[in-house]
Image (spheres, helix red, strand yellow):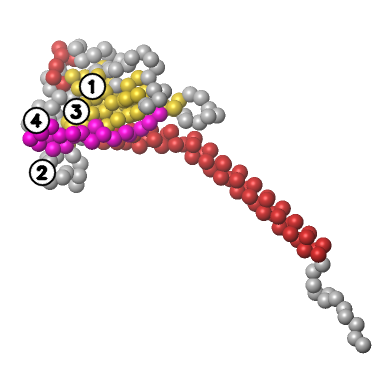
Amino acid sequence: MSKSRSNPKAFTMLELMLATTLIALLAASLYASLRIGMKAGQGALAAVDPTRRLTLAMDLIAQDFQAAAVPNGTLAGSFEGQDNGDGTGLNSDSVSFYTIAPAGTVVAGTGDIRLVALYGQPSPDGRDIELVRDLTTNLLAPQPAVPTEEVLCRGLRMFNLRYYDGANWFDSWDSNSLGKVLPTAVEVTLQINRGRADSDGTIGMVRIVPIPCGQPSDANSTASAGSAG
């Protein structure tokens, strides 16, 4: 009569439980490591996001200023920049001017001269500013064209502009009183909230944008452009 013997290659219940426990511990350790890495990545993105948004907005604004049309052509109107600081801690200037559309962006029948308006408007909660760009094309349409509104950047504390006439900086500019000329450069200042619960303060960016078609204004008219900076 043969005797039954256990298979020496089989695992005991204790060995299976031990292996399962080790696998669970390894999985928990891997999850914790991945979670730490993901949180670090999210923190890094949150830290650079305000700077990235400022850079994108600055690039778009610079493209518009560099394409500014001389305000004495057939379709080119005035270049008007207003200083709108209201003393509430939110500084929001405004400017409107005509530009030449970049090559390849002109829609047939609308012409290549466009009206651009840049301004800040209060956010829905009133805590900061939204930088808005209005673009009007087809300026010769029988009916007034409706501008296309685009929000360039949210969460701003400041949108400030200064204008250079070749000798001095001014807080405002009106080409109608300055011999129908453009400023030779525009200084753009943007200041944005950090947007992080664990940090305070703002991040600022300043860029001086030269205007290719700008020229020094008449010295007698410059005094009326605005207060020098």
Q: Which residue is mark 3?
A: 97
Query: Which residue appears at 83% of the width and 76% of the height?
Result: 7
Which residue does the image show at 35% across and 37% down from the upper left? 56
Residue density around tag 1, few if under 14, some if 14–19, many if 20 or more, within 10 Å: many
Decide if residue 2 is on the left or right side of residue 84: right
Q: Nearer the viewer, mark 2 or mark 1?
A: 2
Asked if 35 appears above or below 178 in the picture, the reply is below
Q: Pick the residue in front: 63 or 7.
A: 7
**Separation of marks 4 and 3 at Cα, in angstroms:** 12 Å
Relative depth, front residue between 36 and 213 = 36
- Which mark, by number, is residue 81? 1
* Coordinates of residue 95 in the picture (x, y in percent): 24, 24
Q: Nearer the viewer, mark 3 or mark 2?
A: 2
Q: In which quadrant will I find the C terminus?
A: top left
Type of amino acid at the residue the image marks with label 4 = Gly
Which of discs 4 and 3 lies nearer the camera? The answer is 3
- Seen in the picture, residue 74 relative to 23 is either above or below; the reply is above
Q: CA distance from mark 2 to mark 1?
A: 29 Å
Identify the residue under disc 2.
109
Q: Which residues are magenta?
A: 134-157
Q: Is residue 212 visible?
A: no
Q: Position of residue 60 (x, y in %)?
A: 29, 36
Q: Earlier in the sequence, mark 2 or mark 1?
A: 1
Assign a secondary structure to mark 2: loop
The reply to whether the C-beta atoms of the residues labelled 3 and 2 are less than 8 Å apart is no
The Cα atoms of the two marked residues, 2 and 4, are separated by: 19 Å
Left or right relative to 207: residue 106 = left
Tell me the quarter of the image containing the N terminus. bottom right
